Amino acid sequence: MARPLLDETFCIPAEARDLEGFRVWARSPRFPERGRLDYLGGDIEVDMSPEDLYTHGTLKIEIAALLHALVTKSGTGVVFTDRTRISSPPADLSVEPDVVAVLWRTLDSGRLREIPSAGERPGRYIELEGAPDLVVGIVSDGSVGKDLKRLPSFYAAAGVPELWVADARGSEIRFEIRALDSGLYKKVEPNPDGWLMSPFLGLRVRLSRKRVHLDRGVYELETQGN
């Protein structure tokens, strides 16, 4: 039975006690339009805190923009952000990552499938089931334990080949690439110049931040050929 982990009063229907019930609720008009609600192995985790503008919002845009340019613009796949629900019955998981990248060949293979919205209107989808090619998690004050400790094992169980984790809350940026190997994630080690090899992109990437007006942080995600 699902065990709600809440930091404020919130109404969760009884039918959301297991993964399938949670997914039905998540696809219904009764599901909250704000906040982030994730189902992890029987726990419903709720984060209603607002998104930090400069340690989360601008960083998410930079990562999504690069992936959009390399994946969507190339015609090889598509990139989603924010309220894109990914569910995996084998992993007992249903979450909304910050950024998700999917190759068309992955959809064609059946490893990932699109779940139609209510009424099954042609071309309208509300959820992805299976393992996308890349998931990006950006750490916020309300998601430290989930993003850094709990979620990676669930993504691995779901078969997600590559996971990026970024944390810009401190004086130094934490940026990791974890590649799936024999069912477990292994961190990609940076080279002496700080570049990390992304198996998904087939490129090295490096994330940096510079301080601009009134010490606000802006980010650059660079790529380098293999």
Image (cartoon, rainbow, N blue to C red):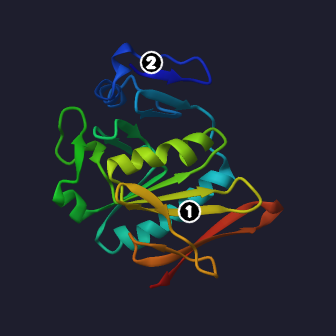
Percent position of residue 82, x then y: 47, 47
Report the amino acid beneath label 2. Ile
Q: Which mark is residue 176?
A: 1
Q: Is residue 142 above or below residue 156?
A: above
Assign the C terminus to one quadrant of the image. bottom left
Q: Secondary structure at mark 1?
A: strand
Q: Residue at x 63, y 38 (%)?
A: 142
Percent position of residue 189, x then y: 55, 71
Report the amino acid beneath label 1. Glu
Q: Secondary structure at mark 2?
A: loop
Give the image quarter of residue 49: top right
Q: Nearer the viewer, residue 222 or 175?
A: 175
Category of crowding for the residue at label 2, using alpha-carbon neighbours closer than 10 angstroms: few (below 14), some (14–19), many (at least 20): some
Decide if residue 114 is on the left or right side of residue 6. left
Mark 2 vs 1: CB contact within 8 A: no
Q: Is residue 121 above or below residue 159?
A: above
Direction top: furthest residue: 14
Q: Is residue 97 above or below residue 28?
A: below
Q: Nearer the viewer, residue 183 or 209?
A: 183
Badge nearest the viewer, 2 or 1: 1
The first of marks 2 and 1 along the sequence is 2
Q: Residue at x 33, y 17 (%)?
A: 15
Decide if residue 201 is on the left or right side of residue 36. left
Q: Nearer the viewer, residue 154 or 175?
A: 154
Q: Which mark is residue 12?
A: 2
Direction front: furthest residue: 182
Direction bottom: furthest residue: 225
Q: Residue at x 66, y 46 (%)?
A: 52
Label 2 vs label 1: CA separation? 34 Å
